[in-house]
Amino acid sequence: MRIVLYALLLTVLVLTAWASFSQPGAPRPSQPADPAGELMAWGAVVVILAGVGVVYWRWRRQGDEARAAAAARGLSYTRTLASDLREPFTRLPTVSRGVLLHNVLEGQWHNREVAVFDMRPYRKSPDHWTYALLPLPGGWPEVRARTVPHGQGAADRTLSALFSTWETIALPAAWGGSATIMTDAPEAAARVIGPETARLVAAARQWRIEIDAEHLLYTEMEKVAAADVSAFLDRVAVLVDALVADRARRAL
């Protein structure tokens, strides 16, 4: 909707400028009427308003399509939501500081409550990443971790400052190859990630997780297309199953 507001502002400026030259005021040198100029001014207004209408129509259509797609998955849809408005979004500082969440889907997936949304990874980022937020069985250590795939891309280099204080850890080879993660809490990560989770790390898909005592925040560090949300949620479910399986193995 930002572009609509800009277009309306431009329309107001054009009309104000035209009106200021049309209204009587201080004596001005007599000038012949300029019907061509007036026609161009009104033409510009019509074009701007038509553009606003097209943008608004596309915005409404995209919202209707997203809402229908969410309903087909058994999820609710909210176009924009304040990140500090309500739970579960207020539970993790990374989310509550996000200001605005976009394309928010909420409901159940594989018998788990889940929320999916787009959010900037940091305040001045020009990009949005897609995140999934879902509850975990209580009692988890607080930890943030991310995979380190072979041959990191340019996006990783531009975001390197976000992870400058994180430590790189090589997971045991017996867990599935040369899997590597970065984490801000190595001891906590060692209590969370086991062989089942390590196999997903070794699968080379880039992702980042954040865990508090009762919630998991997951992102693949990119925006997921609407058509791929179901597959994205399936991958989240697989990761949760792996985390829970590793935790159960440690309890034995």
Image (cartoon, rainbow, N blue to C red):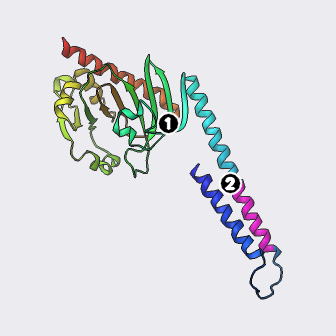
Query: Which is nearer the eye, 236 or 56?
Result: 56
Is 41 covered by the magenta stretch?
yes
Residue 69 figure quarter: top right
Residue 137 lies, with reference to residue 126, above or below; the image says above
Quadrant where the image shows the C terminus: top left
| Magenta-colored span | 36-49
Is residue 36 left or right of 8 when viewed as pictured?
A: right
Q: Residue furthest top?
A: 252
Q: Residue at left 83%, top 79%? A: 33
| Three-letter code, disc 2 | Gly
Residue 5 % position (x, y) = 61, 54
Mark on residue 51? Answer: 2
Question: Which residue, given by chain and number where applicable, does mark 1 sit on?
Answer: 225
Residue 49 % position (x, y) = 71, 56
Q: Residue at left 45%, top 29%? A: 115
Is residue 109 left or right of 40 when viewed as pictured?
A: left
Q: Residue at left 50%, top 30%? A: 105
| Three-letter code, disc 1 | Ala
Mark 1 lies on a secondary structure that is loop
User: Of helix, strand and loop, which mostly describes the magenta segment?
Assistant: helix
Is residue 176 left or right of 51 when viewed as pictured?
A: left
Residue 159 lies, with reference to residue 131, above or below; the image says below
Mark on residue 86? Answer: none
Q: How many marks?
A: 2
